[in-house]
Image: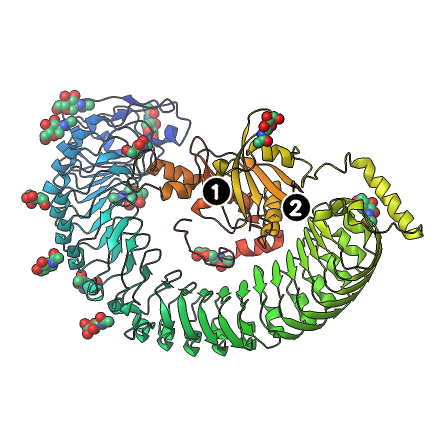
């Protein structure tokens, strides 16, 4: 019998797990290990409880995880299997003495150190699974001596350095090679093309560079080929298209360019997953893709596929081809959003893709009508037709999409009636048809959709008729936008039953009658817009009890009577517009009414009093005024100086416009950190302590930026977590020109945004502009921590709604913070429970689930 020094295996140990190694050698009495005792963590104590000292004979063969062959006195160990046992420490080089070992599985432990080169002595080893540990150092070239290897799994470790070319030379039996999720660098050796038995090659999530070697096209049996998320460049070699057995080809997330060959559809009869996204491919999408009848996933997004209209999507130039309907009936996701080159109409053959769950044409140039056959896609969960040129009627058949949870068709050219059949979409959570040319009344069926909770947006159409009392059935709805239509009649009292509403916008319609008292029941209302209607009567006092109200717009109506004093009790209110009504009596002076730029009462001819800047006549002494003054006095006792620029939230230390102006050197270009749609971010050095901060100044001329300010203030006021950007204060004041000035002051993040790192200015990857895999993982973990906190530990939960690399900021130590809460939403608790308990996705607001920002 060979030298069965059955070995002492593992382990120089980490402090927690102290292992004693007893190795008897030179005879058949194989001894493994005596045990460690002081186990505390990770199950160390129990793991090898059965490995308790020399038992003589073949006793070690019954130790946990050990398997021997034969029945002699000291049979050789052939298998060692201890996955997920909380093992720590390192793997002893003595492992090379287990010369009969065939199978070894130590996956999912916390073993570190190098992979011992002595493994090369294990000529019989056919399976080596060390995945999911903390092994570091280089991948030993000597592994190539384990010529019996069939399965080599080393993914999810910290291996670095080059892939040894030797691996390709002798491992002729290797079928599975997984090295993904390490820190491997250098190029992919040509020699890997010699691994003629290989079926699965997984090198994704490393830092490999250079081109994909042509030789890989020689591994004709290859089924799964994963090079995703490396730094590979150049054109993928044509030889890859010789790999006719491929079922998965994943090369997304590299810097590959070139075109996708026209014949791709005939190359891979068994292809199931094809991902080319996040590269720099150009040209057109090959029509032959439709011949890949087994395809389940195709991801082409975020390339530069544009220019000539892809013949792929049409034999007719410029059209989506009818052949699209010949794609596999097993296809579940067809996501073509944000591909500029896509145009033409949606062929009626689309109805053949009966497995589709996600169909996305959003942000393309697709036009024409929505085919009736769309109604056959009974598995569809999400349909995105927004920002396209689809026109004509919404087919009644859409009502057959009984699993649909999200329907986005805003910003298109749809016309005619909203079909009543939409009332059959019992799973719908979000419906957005805004900004089309729809011109019916709103079917009452829409208001009875039981799960409609995220958003109902029908704004900017030509919808007419009254708002029916059934609107009160939308008890879970968070946002209702019906502005910019021709709705008439009275606002029904039942609106107060929509108690989950946060945003209610009915501006710019022809509503008349009184503002319902019942609105006060909507306790979480943040924004209420009723401007530009024909509402009359008085403003209900009760509105002053909606404590989180931030925006109240009642302008351009026929409202009369006094301004309710209760409005000055609304501490969250930051925007109040009562202009152009017939309001009478005294203007309050406290709360929102303290600063002339936060509210407007112009165009009301019978108002008096208020702060001097309003230049209104003083009020006559009358009972109303007395009452008001009394209230004012009470208030004044608490407010120290009404002339200080008010700060949105008392808990923060105050900071003046001057301090910000001074700290940014007059908001100079040299301090510019970034520019967004709603504002500009500057680096600010405060005079007194020399502390650094980032100041986001809102561009109040940009519509929506005020709301964004309010949303961000409100969200950040509620959150405190190490993975979320920390707010120092909000500043709402007046600048030198007497204009309104709003800014948020954040902790300063010296390493900029994740986007800057993912898309460095210089295209040459260097240590100083490249994130290691570990850093990437840490960043991902931070982001998830932050989101987990927002979704599951915040009361009420908050949905960020705009998560993308440019909104992830990196601290000095490269830890990540989620920032920019400008369009975040605070969920009412019951709605969030509903959402959590269903298996629904909450997407990025108003646009696209699954859209990953390429950069911005
Ligand atoms: C060794 O482990 C076995 C199995 O767990 C146990 O039955 C036996 O009592 C242990 N012996 C010693 C000396 O700890
Ligand atoms: C492994 O084998 C080598 C040589 O055969 C020997 O020198 C060494 O001591 C052995 N190690 C153990 C732990 O058995
Ligand atoms: C190793 O063990 C884990 C856990 O039991 C298992 O999932 C994995 O498939 C095993 N590896 C091999 C190569 O059998
Ligand atoms: C690696 O293999 C080479 C050649 O097979 C051998 O000379 C060397 O000793 C091995 N290294 C170790 C650490 O086993
Ligand atoms: C990963 O590789 C990069 C580049 O070689 C290196 O800077 C980084 O320290 C490595 N990280 C780990 C954890 O090995
Ligand atoms: C392995 O591949 C390399 C490069 O492709 C080649 O030069 C070499 O001859 C091959 N070796 C074997 C043993 O096939
Ligand atoms: C594909 O395979 C065929 C036949 O084996 C061969 O003639 C051709 O050169 C290969 N194509 C490429 C690009 O390697
Ligand atoms: C495709 O899959 C079928 C069924 O699994 C198999 O018989 C066939 O050989 C495969 N085709 C290729 C080219 O690998
Ligand atoms: C699909 O395959 C058939 C048969 O191989 C071929 O005739 C046809 O041209 C292919 N279609 C496309 C669009 O390439
Ligand atoms: C304002 O709030 C205070 C305390 O919450 C309350 O006593 C008072 O009645 C309120 N005033 C109005 C006019 O609602
Ligand atoms: C900032 O304040 C300091 C001290 O008051 C003053 O010296 C400096 O000129 C100011 N800078 C700007 C840009 O106003
Ligand atoms: C959610 O999905 C899981 C697994 O797919 C399933 O077991 C569970 O029943 C689903 N829950 C609901 C509420 O649909």
Is 130 situated above or below 367? above
Q: How far separated are the C-alphas under marks 2 and 1? A: 22 Å
Above or below: residue 455 compared with residue 711: below
Ligand 8 shows up in which quadrant of the image? Answer: bottom left
Judging depth in this view, the residue of 542 and 446 nearest the camera is 542
Q: Position of residue 488 (x, y in %)?
A: 69, 73
Which residue in the structure is indicated by mark 2? 739
Foreground mark, 2 or 1, reads 2
Camera-nearest residue between 788 and 804: 804
Residue at horizontal 18 percent and vertical 55 percent from the top: 240
Number of other residues with Cα within 10 Å of mark 1, as a class: few under 14, some 14 to 19, many 20 or more: few
Q: Earlier in the sequence, mark 2 or mark 1?
A: 1
Residue 170 pos. (x, y %): 10, 41
Reading the image, the residue beneath label 1 is: 674
In terms of depth relative to the viewer, which is nearer, 348 or 427? 348
Tell me the crowding category of disc 2: few under 14, some 14 to 19, or many 20 or more residues within 10 angstroms, Cα based: few
């Amino acid at each position: 019998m060979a030298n069965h020094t059955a070995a002492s295996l593992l382990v120089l140990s980490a402090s927690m797990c102290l292992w004693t190694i007893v190795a008897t050698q030179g005879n058949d009495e194989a001894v493994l290990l005596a045990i460690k005792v002081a186990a505390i963590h990770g199950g160390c104590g129990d793991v090898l409880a059965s490995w308790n000292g020399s038992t003589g004979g073949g006793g070690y063969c019954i130790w946990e995880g050990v398997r021997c062959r034969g029945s002699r006195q000291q049979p050789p160990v052939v298998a060692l299997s201890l996955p997920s046992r909380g093992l720590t420490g390192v793997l002893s080089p003595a492992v090379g003495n287990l010369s009969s070992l065939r199978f070894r599985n130590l996956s999912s432990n916390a073993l570190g150190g190098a992979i011992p080169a002595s493994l090369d002595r294990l000529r019989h080893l056919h399976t080596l699974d060390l995945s999911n540990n903390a092994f570091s150092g280089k991948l030993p070239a000597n592994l190539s001596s384990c010529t019996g290897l069939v399965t080599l799994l080393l993914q999810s470790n910290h291996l670095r350095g080059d892939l040894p070319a030797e691996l390709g030379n002798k491992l002729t039996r290797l079928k599975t090679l997984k090295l993904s999720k390490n820190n491997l660098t250098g190029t992919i050796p040509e020699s890997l093309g010699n691994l003629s038995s290989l079926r699965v090659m997984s090198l994704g999530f490393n830092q490999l560079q250079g081109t994909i070697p042509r030789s890989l096209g020689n591994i004709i049996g290859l089924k799964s080929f994963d090079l995703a998320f490396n730094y590979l460049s150049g054109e993928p070699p044509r030889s890859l298209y010789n790999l006719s057995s491929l079922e998965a080809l994943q090369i997304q997330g590299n810097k590959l360019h070139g075109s996708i060959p026209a014949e791709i559809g005939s190359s891979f009869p068994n292809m199931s997953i094809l991902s080319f996204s996040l590269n720099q491919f150009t040209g057109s999408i090959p029509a032959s893709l439709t011949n890949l009848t087994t395809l389940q996933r195709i991801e082409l997004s975020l390339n530069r596929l544009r220019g000539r209209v892809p013949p792929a999507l049409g034999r007719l130039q410029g059209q989506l081809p009818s052949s699209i309907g010949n794609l596999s009936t097993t296809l579940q996701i067809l996501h073509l959003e944000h591909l500029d080159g896509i145009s033409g109409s949606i062929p009626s053959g689309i109805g053949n893709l009966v497995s589709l769950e996600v169909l996305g044409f959003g942000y393309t140039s697709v036009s024409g009508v929505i085919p009736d056959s769309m109604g056959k896609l009974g598995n569809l969960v999400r349909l995105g037709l927004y920002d396209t040129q689809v026109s004509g009627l919404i087919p009644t058949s859409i009502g057959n999409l009984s699993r649909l949870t999200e329907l986005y068709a805003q910003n298109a050219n749809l016309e005619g009636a909203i079909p009543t059949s939409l009332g059959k979409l019992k799973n719908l959570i979000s419906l957005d048809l805004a900004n089309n040319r729809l011109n019916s009344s709103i079917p009452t069926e829409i208001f009875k959709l039981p799960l409609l909770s995220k958003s109902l947006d029908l704004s900017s159409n030509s919808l007419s008729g009254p708002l029916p009392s059934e609107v009160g059935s939308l008890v879970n709805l968070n946002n209702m936008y019906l502005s910019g239509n021709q709705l008439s009649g009275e606002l029904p009292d039942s609106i107060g039953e929509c108690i989950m509403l946060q945003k209610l916008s009915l501006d710019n319609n022809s509503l008349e009658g009184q503002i319902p008292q019942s609105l006060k029941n909507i306790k979480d209302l943040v924004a209420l817009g009723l401007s530009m209607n024909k509402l009359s009567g008085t403003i209900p006092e009760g509105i002053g009890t909606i404590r989180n109200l931030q925006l109240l717009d009642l302008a351009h109506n026929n409202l009369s009577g006094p301004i309710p004093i209760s409005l000055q009790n609304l501490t969250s209110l930051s925007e109040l517009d009562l202009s152009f009504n017939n309001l009478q009596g005294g203007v309050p002076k406290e709360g929102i009414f303290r600063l002339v730029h936060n509210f407007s009462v112009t165009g009301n001819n019978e108002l008096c009093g208020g702060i001097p800047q309003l230049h209104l006549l003083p009020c006559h002494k009358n009972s109303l005024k007395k009452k008001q003054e009394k209230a004012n006095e009470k208030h004044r006792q608490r407010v120290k100086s009404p002339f200080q620029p008010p700060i949105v939230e008392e808990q923060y230390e105050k900071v003046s416009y001057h301090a910000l102006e001074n700290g940014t050197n007059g908001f100079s270009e040299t301090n510019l950190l970034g520019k967004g749609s709603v504002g500009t971010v500057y680096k600010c050095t405060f005079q007194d302590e020399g502390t650094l901060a980032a100041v986001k100044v809102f561009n109040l001329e940009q519509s929506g930026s005020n709301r964004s300010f309010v949303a961000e203030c409100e969200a950040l006021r509620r959150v405190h977590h190490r993975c979320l950007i920390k707010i120092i204060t909000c500043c709402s004041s007046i600048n030198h020109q007497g204009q309104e000035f709003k800014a948020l002051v954040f902790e300063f993040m010296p390493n900029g945004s994740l986007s800057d790192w993912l898309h460095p200015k210089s295209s040459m990857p260097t240590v100083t502009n490249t994130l290691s895999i570990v850093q990437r993982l840490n960043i991902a973990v931070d982001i998830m921590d932050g989101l987990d906190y927002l979704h599951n530990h915040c009361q009420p939960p908050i949905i960020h709604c705009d998560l993308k690399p440019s909104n992830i900021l990196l601290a000095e130590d490269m830890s990540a913070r989620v920032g920019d809460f400008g369009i975040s939403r605070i969920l009412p608790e019951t709605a969030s429970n509903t959402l959590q308990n269903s298996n629904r996705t909450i997407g990025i607001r108003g646009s696209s689930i699954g859209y990953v920002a390429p950069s911005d």
